[in-house]
Image (cartoon, rainbow, N blue to C red):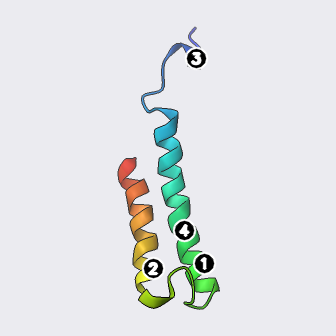
Amino acid sequence: MYSDDDFPSPTPLWYRVIMFAMIVIGVLWIITFYISQSVYPIPGIGNWNIGIGIGFMMVGLVMT
């Protein structure tokens, strides 16, 4: 039988880390926006903060 160590992963570890990090950053961005009552992360752009958070999550999704 073969173990998992015999076959290399099709995706490098750094790529998976960046992919999950982008998704987590997007979620945290939106959570911060809602918890701070639209004051943070960038106060001047208002609801576009949701678009930025979704953009981060989309980049992570596209990386899959």
Residue 50 - label: 2
Camera-near label (4 vs 1) is 1
Residue 27 - label: 4
Quick one: SS at disc 4? helix
**Residue 56's quadrant in the figure?**
bottom left
Q: Are marks 4 and 1 in contact (CB under 8 Å)?
A: no
Camera-near label (1 vs 3) is 1
Nearer the N terminus, badge 1 or badge 3? 3
Q: Amino acid at mark 3?
A: Asp
Residue identifier under label 1? 32
Residue identifier under label 3? 5
- Residue shown at 40%/83% (left/top)? 48
**Residue 49's quadrant in the figure?**
bottom left
Nearer the N terminus, badge 4 or badge 2? 4
Q: Work out how far the residue at label 1 is from the one at label 2, CA to CA, in angstroms.
A: 10 Å
Q: Work out how far the residue at label 4 is from the one at label 2, CA to CA, in angstroms.
A: 9 Å
Position of residue 7 relative to residue 9, above or below, is: above
